[in-house]
Amino acid sequence: MHVKFVNTGGMGTQGNLEQWDDFVGERYDPNRKTEDFRKFDESAPAGVREFYRENHARQTRQFVQEKRRQYAGRGKCEMGIWEACEYLNTLVDESDPDTSLSQIQHLMQTAEAIRRDGHPRWMVLTGFLHDLGKVLCLYGEPQWAVVGDTFPVGCAWSGKIVFPEFFEGNPDGQVAAYQTRLGVYGEGCGLSQVDLSWGHDEYLYHVVKDYLPLEGLYMIRYHSFYPWHQEGAYEYLMDEQDRAMLPWVRKFNPYDLYSKSAAPPDVAALKPYYEELIGEYFPAKIAW
Ligand SMILES: [Fe+2]
Ligand SMILES: [Fe+2]
């Protein structure tokens, strides 16, 4: 059964999950120079701009902390990894149901590209899992609290975050303590101490953190943190571990962005391989 994606994004949101994925895929095209980002952003479709306007205005420190309290305890349900894939796959892109890849196809395509390049099995599995946090949409969370480039809250917003002007609408702009370079954080405190805007990355990290190697957990937790891994912002919040893990996060990114153009994978044929791989790292059911 296919459940149509209900847009609970509130006023002004006309976009869909796919639109954001496409936008970042084009923005971070390796042939595009950073100085051309502005020009590219100006030509973004209205739905994408509205999405970012809402995301930037509503992701406050208080909101992020509330969402973490709500979800990090993993009290929502028990599901196996494959089961979660099938559940996520009920999310249909209403605007473009025929041409876009299903969620499972995107996951498999990412994983297959990693596998083809001969990377370790945990990394193939990480590719296969990395977007399962998008089940937040099926719990009824609005798009602006599920996807979007992530950024720290509780300290000044970097000008390297896409559409920085939209932070004008964020109430944290009125809190002086959050508007300095370090804000509530210490120099070099480490990203694990930093609250990032809430979304599918952070949620899935909490769900899988006991099961994957640290490199994979970094890929999952920070894959949407473009200002950090693509643009070098917030260097002063990093600790030794973050510096050691950054190359892995960067290594993962192209597989997420550019595996889309390849032919859709044969989900049924590949299922046994992925079920075996999942079984190497995960029990039959985990808490979500
Ligand atoms: Fe993602
Ligand atoms: Fe992805």
Image (cartoon, rainbow, N blue to C red):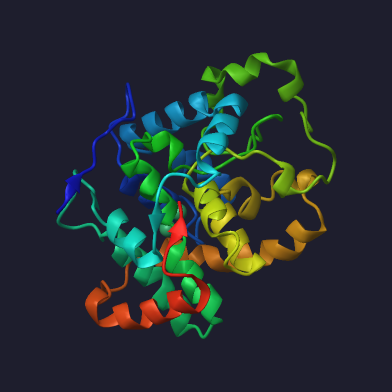
Left/right of residue 6 with respect to residue 235 in the rendered view = left
- Up/down of 80 relative to 175, above or below: below
Residue 184 coordinates in the image, percent (x, y): 77, 29
Left/right of residue 128 with respect to residue 103 in the rendered view = right
Residue 133 coordinates in the image, percent (x, y): 44, 51
* Residue at the (31%, 72%) spot, across then down: 262
Q: Quadrant of ligand 2?
A: bottom left
Whether residue 228 is visible to the viewer of this picture, yes or no, is: yes
**Quarter holding residue 181:** top right
- Up/down of 130 relative to 27, above or below: below
Task: State which quarter of the image contains the N terminus.
Answer: bottom left
User: In the image as oriented, which residue stretches furthest toward the top?
Assistant: 174
- Up/down of 148 relative to 258, above or below: above
264 or 154: nearer the eye?
Answer: 154
Residue 214 coordinates in the image, percent (x, y): 66, 65
* Residue at the (59%, 59%) spot, across then down: 209
Residue 36 coordinates in the image, percent (x, y): 52, 46
User: In the image as oriented, which residue stretches furthest toward the right?
Assistant: 187
* Residue at the (37%, 29%) spot, across then down: 50
Counting labels gives 0
Left/right of residue 48 with respect to residue 153 in the rendered view = left
Whether residue 223 is visible to the viewer of this picture, yes or no, is: no
**Quarter holding residue 250:** bottom right
